[in-house]
Image (cartoon, rainbow, N blue to C red):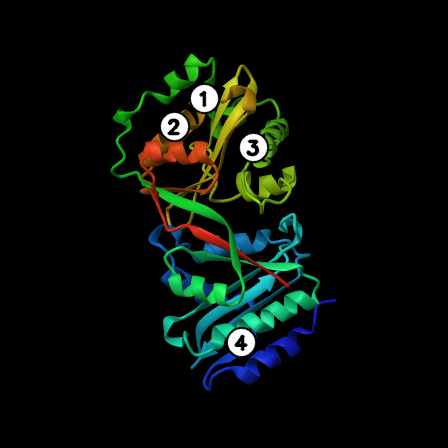
Amino acid sequence: MPPDVQVTIGRISERLPTGVTVRERQRADLAAEVALLNRYSRPAERRDVADAERWESLADPSEVRLRLVLESGGALVGVSGAGDGGKWRPPDGSWGIWVRLEDAWKRKGIGTVLAEALERFARKSGAPSLTAGVRGDEQEGIAFAEQRAYKEFHRRQSSYLDLATFDASRFEDPAAIAERAGIRLASYEELAAAAPSGDQLRRSIHELHSAAWVDVPTPEIPAPPSLEDLSRFIFDSPTFEPRATTFALRGDDLVGLTLADVNGSGIGYTFMTGVRKDARGHGLALAMKLRAIAVLKSRGVELFGTTNDKDNAPMLSVNHKLGYVPEPPSIRLKKAL
């Protein structure tokens, strides 16, 4: 059983500097939390409260976690927590841990107090290890994690394309690229309008998505989402972009996909781009992304982002060709408990 939450909070409170308090995070803290995180995010990473509320609603209710907020003078000055991820837990069972403090409250021992308490909470809850993500340009955070025996084991690379300056004339027409391989491109909107059964279409997409999911070169990936979860995360989301989401088809058979959305801050994002193994080598990933880019640009989206694992050379090559600009990497670190 997890240790008592109030006992953990009490231990933290005893060691905090004067003027700082800690308590369990409440849903009413969401707006202040988003504002804090946005202040320390890269421009293309920022989100609005509606985005955060949506992700909150998609969390696994069975997840074991502790989420904390720190306040001073009635203002939120830090957020922290640890959790097992629920059904999204990595294959090795590791928990996640996170700490974000306002700059004015760093180097006062608060991070150490939080890390020690959360590590103890996770260990007492049965966690074999903890993982943390630190942005590559936050050297102070990397040093802090390494001092606590966290070791790098993986990197992920986010990158963004400036659609306002993107020049599609540098590339061949995406439909022509696909046609050479006997493939046609279509949006989700088009396929849904023509499908005899929307449920069957989603099942076919789920099958292709699952095949692409297990090919992602990462040590952290959990099992592919169920059809129900994929529908909740993607198709039923208010940020889903059915016109930009693009599929490659051989006849009526789905062989490739790129799933796109536009968040509340107006930033486009690719959740997954994948091509079935028997259809690779024909430039279909490039063609699908070119089509998605054209749609998003036509509707005024200025930034189009994606995230790839460091070993995903084929997709990193496609993004480089398109002109995506890399952000500082997300450095993944792990500590055995």
Report which residue position mark 3 lands on.
212
For mark 2, does the 10 Å Cα neighbourhood hold few (<14), some (14 to 19), or many (20 or more) residues?
Answer: many
What SS does tag 1 mark? strand
How much space separates mark 1 and mark 4, taking CA atoms?
A: 54 Å
How much space separates mark 2 and mark 4, taking CA atoms?
A: 49 Å
Report which residue position mark 2 lands on.
291
- The tag on residue 113 is 4
Q: Quadrant of residue 81?
A: bottom right
Name the amino acid type tagged 3.
Answer: Ala
For mark 4, does the 10 Å Cα neighbourhood hold few (<14), some (14 to 19), or many (20 or more) residues?
Answer: some
Residue displayed at 52% across by 44% down = 237
Q: Are marks 2 and 4 in contact (CB under 8 Å)?
A: no
What SS does tag 4 mark? helix
Which marked residue is nearer to the observer: mark 2 or mark 4? 4
Q: Are marks 2 and 1 in contact (CB under 8 Å)?
A: yes
Report which residue position mark 1 lands on.
185
In screen coordinates, is 317 left or right of 229? left
Query: Residue 279: x and y, percent?
Result: 52, 20
Which marked residue is nearer to the observer: mark 3 or mark 1? 3
Q: Quadrant of the N terminus?
A: bottom right
**Mark with earlier residue (2, 3):** 3
For mark 3, does the 10 Å Cα neighbourhood hold few (<14), some (14 to 19), or many (20 or more) residues?
Answer: some
